[in-house]
Image (cartoon, grey):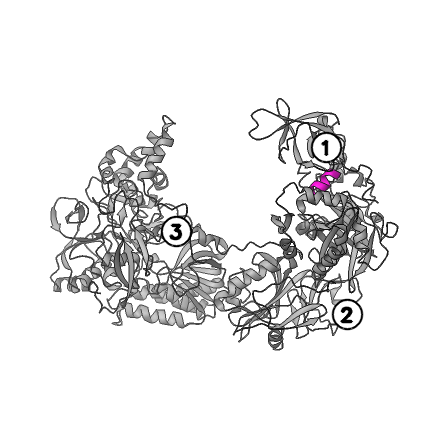
Amino acid sequence: MVAITRRSPVVFDVSPSRQEKRDHWNVALEYPGEGEGPWITDLCHKDRWDVQDGDLVSLASDTLPIPEGYGQVALSPEMSVNRMNRTQAAVWHFTDQPGPMPVVSSFTETTEATVFLALYGPRVFAVTEKLTGLDLGGPDKKPPQLVQGPFSHVPCQIVVAAKSGEYPGILFTCSRGYARDMVHAVMDAGQEFGLRPAGEDRFKQWLNRF
Amino acid sequence: MMNRITNLPTLKIDPSKAVSLKYHDIPYQGCAGDTVATALYAGGVRIFGRSLKYHRPRGLYSLDGECSNTCMEIDAIPNERSENLPARDGMVVREQNVKGSAEHDKLSFIDKLDWAMPAGFYYHTMHKPAALWPLAMKQIRKAAGLGRLSPDFRQTGRFDEIFPSTEVCVIGGGPSGMQAALSAAEQGLRVILLEARPWLGGFYDYRTVQDDHAVPLYERGRKLAEKVSAHPGIRVLTHTSLVGTYNNGLVTAFRRGSSEDSFAERYIEIRAKSVVVATGCIERPLLFENNERPGVMQAGCAHRLLNTFGILPGKTAVFAVGHDLGLEAALDLHDQGVNIACIADLRTEGQNPDLLKALESRDITYQPGQTALEAHGKKLLTGVVLGSMDGSSQKTLPCDLLVASAGLTPVSGPLTINKGSVAYDAHTGSFLPDKLPENTRVAGRILGLGDPEAIEASGHLAGLQAAQDCGLDSAADLQKAEQALAELPGPEKGTDFVIGPVSGRKSFICFDEDTTIKNIKQAINKGFDVPELIKRFTSAGTGPGQGGIPDHNLPLFTALYQGSAQESVRPTNRRPPLTPIFLSTYAGRNHDMAKRTPMHDRQKQDGGIFRRLGVWRRARYFSEDLSCRQEVENVRSNVGIFDGSTLGKFRIHGPDCLKALDRVFVSDMHKVKQGRIKYTAMCNEDGCVIDDGVITKMGENDYFFTTSTGRAGATVEWIRYHTRYEGRDFHMVNLTDAFGVINLSGPNARKVIEKVVDQDISNEALPFSGVKGFSIGQNVEVFVMRLGFVGELSYEIHVPSSYMESVWDLLLEAGQEFGIMNFGVEAQNVLRMEKGHIILGQESEQRTNLLDVHLGFLWHRDKPEAKTVGSLALKQAEQDPDRLKLVGLKMQEAKVPGDGCVIVDESRIRGYVCTIRKSFSVDGIVGLALVEGPLAKPGSVVSIYEDECKGNLLKADVVPLPFYDPEGARMKA
């Protein structure tokens, strides 16, 4: 009998030392030897929505704070709402069980469409500058801020969550099919800085700073 | 380290750490901090290789890689600049361009044949008879020196790249560059400072003279370097050579990694808002007979050999120089024990009086208004003829070192490469920056400055100017900095001397290409009267040194020889890379970013042979049998499972979505219903088919459609582009990667799927062209389409990607009793071809429209409101009988021509084969072809031309389509 399992497209060289089953996903909570950072965490199991509407602001609520300005991000430990353009926003949930998606045609479930990764910790922008010409740590970036552009030559949606302090970091998505090569490119770029896969526990610690 | 002076405060080597390398299988010992060339020089090596054309011995001349003299093969890599490359333990060094050895080169006799090889020798001699050239080329290439790279050579090491952004990029880590970096960084800007040498300091780092505050310049340089390195806003990249500068503040460079770095070489692509060029000067070579004989070197080279590397460059030295830096070098060399036989100074005025006093106090013979006319010595320098400028008085002095330098040449490549320009300046006798590229500033010696305080002040000013470029208001500071600079000494007086009274036969203006003054005269005499033409006719400046040696001498001599003003000429253009760079460095890590389907690993385990198709990696075959017979037959007789996840998948919703669909799809989209799928196509403005797929209605103003794999990436932009003026209110979501697609095909397909779904899936419940949602396994929601691309009963199951592998496993388990097996892209290709279904791009091209490929039935001609893209062109084309038409072919003989073979008649090409395969379903070789209208009639016979067919054309009959199941009974079963 085939057991139903949801599989993340992300594959690291190491297996998690601790994981749990959640909605058919095997969620990695911790990896062996996570080190001192920087870290990369697979967030593919986190729910994501696309919101598109001619009157986007009308869909905003206390539980869904859609920012008014393009490129602005409403980041909290529960979610990131990224205003992409006049009519579109992306919602990335961080909680284990977010509420159901509103039954409005403006919303589309996109959890399966993208690979979702967090890259954070010391020297994270030294890693990113090996992968993109986007000036993610530049003085014109006011975190949290959305940047859309190529990352390792692949179109990505990137949220600069923090760029200074002890734990700068970004969250980003790209087409799910690129997961394997994207992770390979990021790990390769981060090798010299000690980049290691980290589980959801460490990610939550980082996220709770916001 | 007996051969080193170890007590100099300026040293950059660590005499306590030995570095061992091999040359001629003999170990040479250098010190940490040495370059390969300095380690060899310290070990007594004087001849590093032979010249390109004449096989003349060549030695250490500069230490900044301005010529190919010290290019060597190091660790099997030819053309390494040994004077720039840090020595490392275990390096194996060989000379290049020699037959025998650098000391004893059997081809050195060519030097005596220079009379037979005038400028333009190849142009004159190699075109008649033309058959001579291939023979001559081989011999010339054997004799000429470009190094040899073994075909088996594999370069090791890690080559990567970074793409940093900054506000200010400073090129050059000398005093002015460091000051520019500091003043920009103190304005709160990010600064990247590039320096080619492994340390900062520029021309301060080896000089012992004191500045106005009685601080030796090397100490001043170190203090500045410490300040720069400690500044949090400045990122220092040493050992980083410039590749190019471009508009919009793009600066490219590469950095050589040390043993502590994670890379062998790193490509750097910087985006800066402002660029400061503080590249200083190189020395202008002095022209005289045998001016490149080993033992002749530039003042900076001799000075740095001593003060940076602790090496005495010779025992008895003669100086023939034209600037104070030469006098400083003479003093330091003298103080460390070198016998200075004489200093000939081109100048008769403008010398630093303190230096003259110091020479006098040491009893060093100093002769102003004199120059070198000829170097003596067969392989190495043994003496020099000095004389007055007009040659009226001459004397010969024995020596083993001749320090020769005519003046200074500002390094303006980073400016001119980016459309900046230089102009002759009579005061300095050199070409100084004239027009600067946008948001580019200059500082330091490139402006002709020589006074240390002025050099630093110009750097400070340039840093503030760069800050202004970045939008900072620093007007007050700028004014102050401008005033401070104006109060300091300006550009130093230089010499305009070019060459003494010599024949020029062995006076080399370009070492890399063995170009002599005589060659330049020959070129000018033939009418090549400007430097850019002379460069091309004589090759001067086209070698790896990028014109570093002939840079100023070529235009100055051109003007002198023609009696024209120096203002009428300028140095030749530079082009990137300004410094040679490995192709490996350009390539970088070269991650091949491709997409994988959710079934990638599983299909690989199942023996899938993958090919890159567009952005995807796809399983093309599942066996070594490239005809895929087993895969095809299993689908026809049983059931096959295929991963179609790469299909484009889109949701379109919003009040105006139907209008948008009507605009881009050729069909009447109002007829698309819930529970049914409609096959349709998109055309471009010429009516040519660009995409096809199916569409279904999901709800009110809500549709889901698929596209071909190759077009998925362009679909959203295509639809938005074609509705851009109409203000339509609709939205699109690319769900291509959100769903995996399982194609279950074959007569047993229903038997398999009905075992896993939760509802009736009979032909009545889900007929052909139907679509329905099902639950599989533990409530995995999927939707299933009844399609027939391969001509059999088929189900296209759209599964959320994360569940894909589990659902696939369920189907495999269910299909086990029915002999289910994988089929790949090639088997699908054969199956659909037998059915006569086209793949866009394979059976279509930029000339073929919807009608040509028999898809005209999709076109709804009477859409009342929508202006269908391509409709107008289709109306014009439908009466044209000569257009290419899609036809079926059946080969008359048992040979399969390749896809793409042309169809010909006696005089011209009449079409081509799109796809043709051995078909096991219809027992024959059949295919699809595009042919001109008159040939498209069934019964026609066409002739197929294959490469290398030697006139034996293959014959095929034009037959009706499809080849397989013409009534479609099987797919609708």
Is B829 within the magenta?
A: yes
Q: Which residue is mark 3?
A: B580
Please state the chain letter of the residue tagged with numbered disc 2 in the rendered image. A
Please state the chain letter of the residue tagged with numbered disc 3 in the rendered image. B
Q: Is residue B640 above or below residue B483?
A: above
Q: Is residue B76 above or below residue A183?
A: above
**What distance separates the C-alpha of mark 2 from that of mark 3?**
59 Å
- Please give the label number shown on residue B888: 1
* Nearest the eye: B876 or B760: B760
Indicate the secondary structure of the residue bearing disc 2: loop
Q: Is residue B639 above or below residue A138?
A: above
The reply to whether the C-beta atoms of the residues labelled 1 and 3 are less than 8 Å apart is no
Three-letter amino acid code of the residue under disc 2:
Pro
> Dot 2 surroundings within 10 Å: few (below 14), some, or many (20 or more)?
few
- Please give the label number shown on residue A55: none
Q: Are marks 1 and 3 on the same chain?
A: yes
Q: Which residues are magenta?
A: B828-839
Three-letter amino acid code of the residue under disc 1:
Gly
**What distance separates the C-alpha of mark 2 from that of mark 1?**
53 Å
Q: Which residue is mark 2?
A: A100
| Left or right: residue B204 compared with residue B154 | left
| Left or right: residue B206 compared with residue A139 | left
Residue in the picture at 55% in, 63% down:
A186
* Nearest the eye: B540 or B363: B540
- The chief SS type of the magenta part is helix
For the N terminus of chain B, give its image quadrant. bottom left
Three-letter amino acid code of the residue under disc 3:
Pro
Percent across and percent down for residue B46 are 22, 52
